Image (cartoon, rainbow, N blue to C red):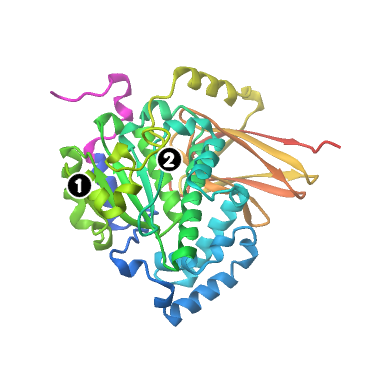
Amino acid sequence: MALRWPPEEAHRYLSLQDLLEAILHAAKDPVKAGVRFRMMSGDSAFPAHSELTSEQLEQIRVLREKTADLTETLPDYRGDFALLRWLVAHDYSLDSALPKLRWALQAFLSQGLDSLDLSTVDKVADAVDAVNPVVKYFPGGLMGNDREGHLIYVQALAKVDPRSISKAGKVTDLFRCMMTDCQGVHALICASERKTNRKMGVSLIIDLEGFSLDLMYMPTIKIFMNLITLLQMMYPDMGRRIYVINAPGAVNTVYHMIQPVLAKETRGKVEFLDSSWRDRLCEELGAENILEHWGGTKKALGATGRIRMGGKVPESVLIENMRECGEPADKELKKVSVPARRHGTVAVAVAEGGSRLRWWFRCDSGDIDFLIRKDGHEVWPRFRTTTEFVPEFGEILCEAPGTFELVFDNGHGKLWSKNIALRVDIERPFL
């Protein structure tokens, strides 16, 4: 039977050809595409501390020294293995790794990730839920450790409802939720490394049970691709193995078509498991570490523990979300046009420390990179966001007076300008 998209929304669905072209482009030049694939295979990617060379230890020392001003409240990023991950991801080039690491640390601090208790799987899940409760409709979550101390993360990708999740909240809330999730994974990896004195990683189980072409909904595909790019830039070299289970034949076919152009290290990490996947997971990760829902013996309060299983976002949630967004009158909005390959800046003078800077904006088409700078530093990190369904809005606390620059970057745009409708407010501190 032929598959058909709803006629009124057919333009928003990604064809298999478009999907292949996007993946092939990223595979041929992952750095240019904003994605670095550095998933080394075998035990050599997870050395004991005694196996680190003097050259590696010296580069780690330099990286630690040059980021010390940002890691006082992020002590995990002083660890040898945590810094080694950044060196591996950037081919041991300090000139490449250092600015990217400093940018990531500043982003973590701006989002308050340094103040969270991420010491257990439950506390990580609680922290993610606290960012935005709607995240429960975006599948994923930690299962725990395997028998060697590596983390196990499950992504029940096919359980997401792409059309409702794209309308359930602003894009940056999803990014912030997933940053919190990944920060929790990183914290638990570092804790395991301190116990084992060996570099640890994450085994990712991608469960495609229920997969259908409805998942290829263009607005959500774009959001997911931007999310993956962001997380791989912020949390490099954490993957250990990728198990794909319950994959329909169509997914296998697509993967095997692009496999020849994928990096050898990536091909060595991804494995599509057959119908005996339960036995494989239990054999390699330990039945005692796999929840019963996925064939193991591990008990939890629910069938899937704290792993989010997605689902359709209720209409009542969508209505409430739109009510919270608000919509300023047109006369209150400042219009900013940003040409392709250019950026636009709106400077805002804040007279008093303790003020709150608030923003609300819509972009008329496509996505735009949005960030806020003060004195050359990002006080709100660069997020590539789209406002097709939900406007972007938020606030930051201005600890000191000065000029804050709201930057709208269309540098990734090739042809089209982006038109921004923006409102900015400053709330002075209460005396």
* Residue 147 vs residue 227, the one in the foreground: 147
Count every numbered label the image shows and give the total: 2
* Residue 245 vs residue 283, the one in the foreground: 283
Please state, as top left, top right, bottom left or bottom right, where the N terminus lies in the image. Answer: top left
Q: Earlier in the sequence, mark 2 or mark 1?
A: 1
Image-based side of 106 in relation to 41, left or right: right
Q: Position of residue 253 (x, y in %)?
A: 16, 43
Q: Are marks 2 and 1 in contact (CB under 8 Å)?
A: no
Q: Position of residue 195 (x, y in %)?
A: 47, 63
Q: Position of residue 421 (x, y in %)?
A: 57, 32
The answer to if 399 sits in the magenta stretch is no
Image-based side of 379 in relation to 351, left or right: left
Q: Amino acid at mark 2?
A: Trp
Q: Which residue is mark 2?
A: 416
Residue at disc 1, secondary structure: loop
Magenta stretch: give its range.
1-17
Q: Amino acid at mark 1?
A: Leu
The answer to if 5 sits in the magenta stretch is yes
Q: CA distance from mark 2 to mark 1?
A: 43 Å
